[in-house]
Amino acid sequence: MGQRGSKIKITEQDKAVLQLKRSKDSIHRYTRRTNDLIASEQQELKAMIRANPQTYKSNNKVRLLLKRVHYQERLLDQASDQLINLENMLANIEFKLVEAKFLEGIQNGNKILTKLNKEFVNVDEIMEDAAEQIAYQNEIDETLAQNMVGVESYEDEIDKELEAMENELVGEMAPEMPTTEGLPAPQLPQRQQEQVAQSQQEEEVTEQPRQEAPLLA
Amino acid sequence: MKRFGVAAFDASKGAYESETLQRQSKEYDEQLKLFQDRLVQFANAHNNELKENPEFKAKFMKMCYSIGIDPLNLFDKDRHLFSVNDYYYEICVKLIQICRETRDINGGIVSLDELRKVYFAGASNVTEEDIEKAVEMLGSLDGGFEIFEIRNHLKFLRSVPTELTSDQTKVLEVCSVMGYASNSLLQANLTWEKLRCKATLNEMVANGLLWIDDQCGGREILYWDPSWITRSTQEHL
Amino acid sequence: MTVPPIYAFPPLYTRQPNAIIRNKQIDSWEDILLTTARENGLWEIDTEGKFTSQTTQELPPHLQGSIFSNESIGRTAPPLFVKEILSHMLTKGSLVQGGSDTTSAYLVLWKNMDSWASLMLEWCETTNKLGQVVTLYELTNGDESIGWDFHGMPQGLAARCLRLLVKRGRATMLQDEYDRDIAVKVI
């Protein structure tokens, strides 16, 4: 018994089932044969009765044949019972095999679970480690956030510088303004001059808003 | 077959199932029959549209084929269903098919009687005249289809280009009585010389027109006409 | 029995000299053989064309002699011609060598081995036999295969078909103490 160049395994259970099935087959074969025999004997019986309608009851041969048929039928019944027993047993085995598979599955699951649990032994260390890492990460985040604050003030500075530049530009534009053209510039200290220019520009804005656009652009 | 053991319980179930199945299949048959009848009615009612619209016609025919109606049953010569020519075209197609399929067995000669009773058994409205008319139409194809007559009433269709000689036709005439011919039969009936009988018979065997049979009491070889193969089927009709 | 009408045509029993006709003739014989085997549940034929039954049931009267002999018309195909027909079927694969004993030399395959193997696989699938040990007797004679075309098939032939499944990697055979194939496990 064995497997010929095949990967499919034949287990001990398979062999046991095979033995059972072989017995079942032989009983099956027997019942079929007996059934055929009974059928043919009944045919024979009928033929004898038909041939001798008056005297068949006293015919020994007929009586014997009928007894034989009864005997065979009893045997057939027994065989059928045995067949059912074997079939039940096979069904039980099949179910037990399923149960065994179930158990095996549970055991395997359990094994994996314990193995996995074992890996949780140094969980504290890992957690500590993780906390440290998180703290460090927070630190980095903070630092980065501070830098971000710096960037904000830098933006403010940029704004201020831009404003100053704007003022400068306005100053340069002042002599071209139409309101001051041809007039002698009043002798004022530099600061005052700037103020004047500023106020002049404000007037301009209200009077000629179109000129503002190129200035700011 | 008797079942034993647990399987015996299935036996009664099987009987019940087969009964149900039978009833169902009978119902399906009835429905199919009804549907087929309706289709034929439909074809009658919409004859003109079918005639005028080739696409519609083609689709209709396809449907008929798929549910098992031989289109030949749809045609009605008197009422000119579709157009009358279509009916004959269908017969032509069928004739060519039959001749091709049976050529190896009968050497390309088939009697009109056999054609109608055996091969057109599914289309009961086809008559020998229809077949003859279809063969006439096939004539324009120059495919060598021709009808010839022996003993003034038995008609045969020849689907091979080589024409039968008058001697060969005579042999077929003899065959049409008993199914076979032989040297002595020919000599007695046609008063041919021995050599002529032999030559004609041998040539017909070589052309596949006759099958030999050397088991008639061992005295003489019989030469059988293959159209007798279906004779037993024809007798049932 | 539904044999084709050509079975009653006397020249069928004489080897035809015309080669085209003879091919048709041999095809007709093959058809007759396979149809008869299929319809009567027969599997083995001897070199003379006589079917052998595996069951206790007797063969119907017209099959007790050689299939190549038709009493109703008094014709019998000569042995040489029978040999030619059978060897044609052997080359085509509708017959294979190896009956159960020496007198019945051929197994009649009205389906090819591959189809049988696939059908058996289908049976295992539909009756939930996958992964189980199934005896050849159970497969070919058991109650669960009644109505399947391979019911009644000789176990030797069944084993040969199943070996194709082994080759496909779907099955393995189990042997008894005399190393004969008696069961199969299909997965």
Image (cartoon, coloured by chain):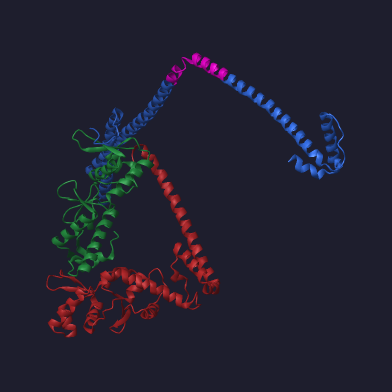
Chain colours: A blue, B red, C green
Q: In which quarter of the image is the C terminus of chain C?
A: top left
Q: What stretch is highlighted in magenta?
A: A113-136
Image x and y of residue C101, in percent: 16, 46
x and y, in percent, of residue A203 in the image: 86, 39
The magenta stretch spans residue B116: no
The part of the image, by quadrant, that contains residue A172 is top right
Can see residue B215? yes
Q: Quadrant of residue A147?
A: top right
**Position in image of residue B84 (x %, y %):** 47, 77
Please tell me which residue is depicted at 61% across the width and 21% down the height of the picture: A143
Residue A189 image point, x, y percent: 84, 29
Position of residue C5 relative to residue A179, above or below, is below
Q: On the rendered image, what quadrant is the N terminus of chain C found in?
A: bottom left
| Residue A125 drawn in magenta | yes
| Residue depicted at 30% across the width and 82% down the height | B149
Q: Nearer the viewer, residue C136 or A217?
A: A217
Does residue A172 sit above or below A121 in this rendering?
below
Q: Is C18 above or below relative to C30? A: below
How many numbered badges does the structure rendering display? 0
Q: In this view, does B216 lie to the left or right of B176?
A: left
| Residue A54, visible in the rendered structure | no
Q: Does A200 sit left or right of C157 as displayed? A: right
Residue in the picture at 55% in, 74% down: B48
| Magenta: main secondary structure | helix
Kindly indicate the quadrant of the structure image that contains residue C80.
Answer: bottom left
**Could you tell me which residue is drawn at 82 percent across and 32 percent down?**
A194
